[in-house]
Image (spheres, rainbow, N blue to C red):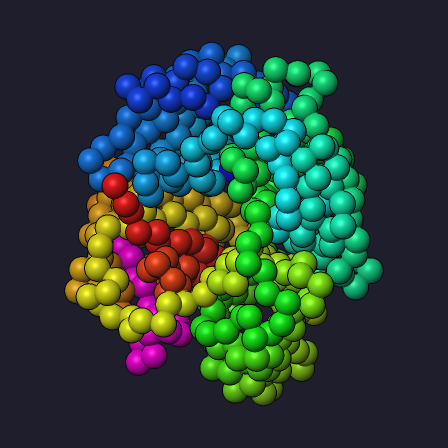
Amino acid sequence: MTGSEIASSGLASSNLFTRLGSFTADGKGVITTGAEDINLVTGSNEFNFTGGSYSVNGDGRGTLSLIDSSGTLTFSITLVSSSNGYIIAMPTDGLSTASGSFIKQDPSAFLVSGISGNYAFDFSGLDASAVPQPESVVGQFFADSGGHFSTGFADDNDGATVVNGGNQPITGTYAGDPLIPSGLASFGRGVFNLGGIQGVFYIVGRNQVKFMETTSGGALAGDAFTQSNIPTTTAGISGGFVYVMGGSGGSGPLTRGGRFTATSGALSNILVDNNNAGTLLSLGASAGTYTIDSAGSGRGTVTYNVAGQKNPFMYVFYLISPTQAVVQDQSIGIVADGSLLGQASATISDSSLAGNYAINWSGLTSTNMTSDEEDLVGQTALAGGGLTGTIDLNEFASGNQFTSVPLTGTFKLSADPTGHNTLTVSLATNPANNGITFFAYVANNNTVLFMATQSVRLTAGVLTPQTQ
């Protein structure tokens, strides 16, 4: 999870923090054990969970409480399936907020050899400078199953400066934590050093590992996913793709979304939506180019020019598969990253999109655009272009938390539904949050990425179809 807290040191403003951990649920509403690492402005700490509880409603929404030596941590959750979902912090003291995801672990992979093969990764957060700057690091590494990262490459966008032009070689190590040797077998927890970023990891399974920086001064966190069927020519990447990224632009916080069609190194039907500190700009381009690494690292680039814009748009991506990648914006003055997903070839329609979805969004609101966060999680049903559901909201900017709030809205498809569509959401909070507008982009499997289009809200999120 990544979020904001009012620092216990007495600082007046909120500060970014990250947390990463593991808990064990007994299937009956009881948390039996667990552990977590948290990187606060005052330093990193590791805690053991001694108990807790959870509940799940029929629509997949629920609550989670985890008990450690600092007290009881409280969260709202929504299940996507029986093995994964979204989570936001709902602390009783109201002094923090955070958003993230949870996923069922495979304990058979809780070994050093459980990390093996080629992975694409995306870490984001703040760098280790005296005045922290936004930082995004995306890349690829090979794990030898014996504790070494090798033959990897990374693009480090630190404060809108791409370090050494990007595509830099990286190496590193990973192991069980010698200070907590039982952590690997119990929770999949260990320590790592990757290209100078040092911290902890938790193994999800042999296909995914979560990482968090703790001891090298910065506050980066993210995931690494095993790569499969990685193409070595541009012909191996084709069709429509959508993306949403979050980060920082020259004027402040930024969200950026869009789509393009890829065909043998050429881009067409290019659309980019940009919300930079509340200023919305929607642009299009007829042509561009993309590349892919012929050596098979999965690294590729996207470049296109928009009429009236002085500088080109430039992205770098690392493929997880031919239709999924992590993506980083390297346009001048921008540091941002997110997800790049392929689109299905089938027609997108109200009927094809109908169903139940988990909804999650996170971002900044207007009370203080530099620091105040808003996090939402819940469930909604989409039918005939209309939305109904129930959500929980931590509106940190105004100091309010809301639970079991009715959600209504519309999902209006554009003339070309493969481009940006209009998502409008109203929340029955007090006072009400009516008419929150987003651009929404439909990816494969009906996953919908979206970004806010308001001047008072810079949030990005996802609608994920629920399964039993």
In the rendered image, is residue 132 in sight? no
* Residue closer to the observer: 14 or 142: 142
On the rendered structure, is 316 left or right of 353? right
Q: Is residue 425 magenta?
A: yes
Q: For the stretch drawn in magenta, what is the main secondary structure?
A: loop
* Residue closer to the observer: 78 or 319: 319
Q: Residue at x 79, y 56 (%)?
A: 168
Tell me how many marks there are: 0
Quarter occupied by residue 229: bottom right
Q: Residue at x 60, y 74 (%)?
A: 234
On the rendered structure, is 23 left or right of 208? left
Q: Is residue 74 above or below residue 386?
A: above
Q: Residue at x 64, y 67 (%)?
A: 232
Q: Residue at x 21, y 59 (%)?
A: 354
Q: Position of residue 7 (x, y in %)?
A: 60, 30
Q: Position of residue 246 (x, y in %)?
A: 54, 57
Q: Is residue 374 above or below residue 274?
A: above
| Magenta span of residues | 414-431
In the rendered image, is residue 118 in sight? yes
Q: Is residue 55 above or below residue 155?
A: above
Q: Position of residue 188 (x, y in %)?
A: 57, 26
Quarter occupied by residue 460: bottom left
**Which quarter of the image is occupied by the C terminus?**
top left
Q: Position of residue 124 (x, y in %)?
A: 62, 48
* Residue closer to the observer: 206 or 204: 206
Furthest residue to the left?
Answer: 384
Q: Is residue 204 magenta?
A: no
